[in-house]
Image: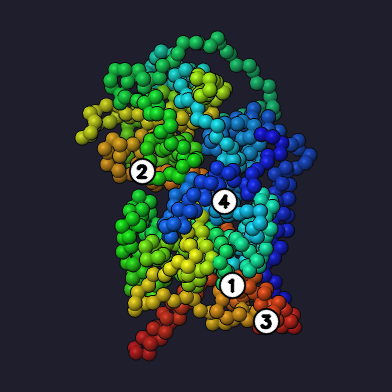
Amino acid sequence: MSATPSYNFAYLDEQTKRMIRRAILKAIAIPGYQVPFASREMPMPYGWGTGGVQVTAAIVGPTDVLKVIDQGADDTTNAVSIRAFFAKVANVKTTTHTGDATIIQTRHRIPEKQLQAGQTLVYQVPIPEPLRLLEPRETETRVMHALKEYGLMHVKLYEDIATHGRIATTYGYPVMVEDRYVMSPSPTPKFDNPKMHMSAALQLFGAGREMRIYAVPPFTKVVSLDFEDHPFEIQHFSEPCALCAATGVYLDEVILDDHGGHMFVCSDTDNCEDRRAAGHRGALSGEVLEAAE
Amino acid sequence: MYVAVKGGEAAIANAHALLADRRRGDRSVPALRTEQIIEQLGLAVDRCMAEGSLYDRELAALAILQSRGDLIEAIFLVRAYRTTLPRFGYSRPIDTADMLIERRISATFKDLPGGQLLGPTFDYTHRLLDPSIAQGNDVAEPLTAEADHDRAPRVTDMLGHQGLMEPDLGFNHVPQDEVGDLTREPLQYPLDRDLRLQALARGDEGFLLALGYSTQRGYARSHPFVGEIRIGEVEVELDIPELGFPVSLGRVRVTECQMVNQFKGSSKVPPQFTRGYGLVFGQSERKAMSMSLCDRALRARELGEDITAPAQDEEFVISHLDNVQSTGFVEHLKLPHYVDFQAELDMIRTMHAKHAAENSVQEAAE
């Protein structure tokens, strides 16, 4: 080992990138189908985005502009760490602005701003198999997908309704892709599911530990599973963002004190900042809180 | 004013600086050197090489030092480095019958060709803490003797010649390009034994120990005997197509365990002894023995046995034995999950509201 190990552009060697690109191409050709790939150990732990990082490393080029979000935010520690990784090993330009990015790697959210043709959204996926928590065996679930045998999933959703009066899945809500494969959207809140449908952007999903890549090409039908009498619905928040007054966006609850005081703020920090820059003010944005102190 | 948690970058840098400080510890105590780890913590180095699946004592020692002695973290460091290395080719199968043996024991025969050699073992030591070690006392030179250059044939081969043991077809029976490589191809179940053994060889020692133990306590009991354990150095050879003959790349120290297991026969096979195989980089009998128990248990399908216990369940065992994968996914729960948690909070609140409304209606009716 030399004193200063040198790494290839975007860390992975070219053979590995070629192998991953082949898996990506196959995934695009069969929307929603999980393509096995020979996932590598990465310099960050499994479960921390190694699948997404490998997909990004395989597709990123010198002219790309990369945005990385975790829980919708650019400044969460793991997003910072992954962005710094690519800035270091690929010297790639990074941004926090959704509109400026050519590649957006994400964990658990889809940006609020509508994605455009030419953009690629790379999801970090912990458990790619939507049927896994119903059937732990890969040998079984593979056959179920091959036969398009999704009764188990519908029974699970039905049992939710029988027990709780509603479908109790709130994130990682299963979708049907192009009327063929049931797919996990990764643990994004179901609020984001409709954004996947007919998106102009390419959506790639990487699961490193589980060694699977899957894809939703642009303008692909993505339908959340439901029943005629219990149609799919997304979360609705009763109050707007306390900082930018946005409605119809996904909000995080922030605890302010130990007496139950809380506020709701945008999960998508970039969208929130854009709105505040454009002059939108929420109930608890700067001036108001300072005055209260 | 409420500020969304910013400055992750500075926080990470500061945390890493603190980590470096804690790793170094009290500056008045001399810094550990990797040679000290290689020489004096050799079994930690061995474990790191085995589960990191990279035979390099210096790098393993560096990883142990860098990880503050957290061996799973050290194994992870080694793996992440290993994966970047190009593959020049695949070596010829090592011949453990040709091993330069330092330790070799059999529990099935009192004496055997090549003899029994205890070697550097903890066995029969009394586990009494020895304060003289803490004082750094000198250690006497051990007795040595001229190496016996006779080959020490494997016990399982001797049984095999008598037809009491299932035949070992050997790797020569399988064309080399048909042996899988789990580091280059995605695992797809069911596995053949080559890939299963690869996974077991780099699997977590503790996990395999527990599973091996479970087979002894009746969960897939296979009546094992230690046919043989041998530890020593073997030559690694690589075929060079241009030369037309294999060249030696050097020696590696390995621990090999061959379990001999009773087998009452099945519809497919007559009664005979069967094998469980364990091979590990470095010196680790615990791991090699656990591996051979698990290997035998995982052969249930091949031998037509009922699959009733966790140790026989290939998907269960192989999917969960890798400590780098396991620790990553368990520890990823530390990452923020507030988006998902918000979704769950919302659902629970809705259900509570519904529950309260129904109860109040019920109370009013009563």
Q: Secondary structure at mark 3?
A: loop
Give the residue displayed 73% in from the left and 55% down from the top: B14
Disc 2 vs disc 4: which is toward the camera? 4
Q: Residues within 10 Å of mark 2 (few under 14, many from 20)?
A: few
Q: Amino acid at mark 1?
A: Lys
Q: Kindly identify which residue carries mark 1.
A: A113
Q: Kindly identify which residue carries mark 4.
A: A58
Determine contact: label 4, label 1, CB under 8 Å: no
Q: How far across and down, in percent of the image, does residue B253 sit?
A: 54, 25
Q: Secondary structure at mark 4?
A: helix
Name the chain under label 3.
A
Farthest residue, direction bottom: B364
Report the front residue among B128 and B251: B251
Q: Which mark is residue B190?
A: 2
Report the front residue among A98 and B332: A98
Give the residue displayed 33% in from the left and 36% down from the top: B299
Q: Amino acid at mark 2?
A: Pro
Same chain assignment for discs 1 and 2: no
Q: Secondary structure at mark 2?
A: loop
Q: CA distance from mark 4 to mark 1?
A: 25 Å
The way the protein has been coloured in the rendering is: rainbow
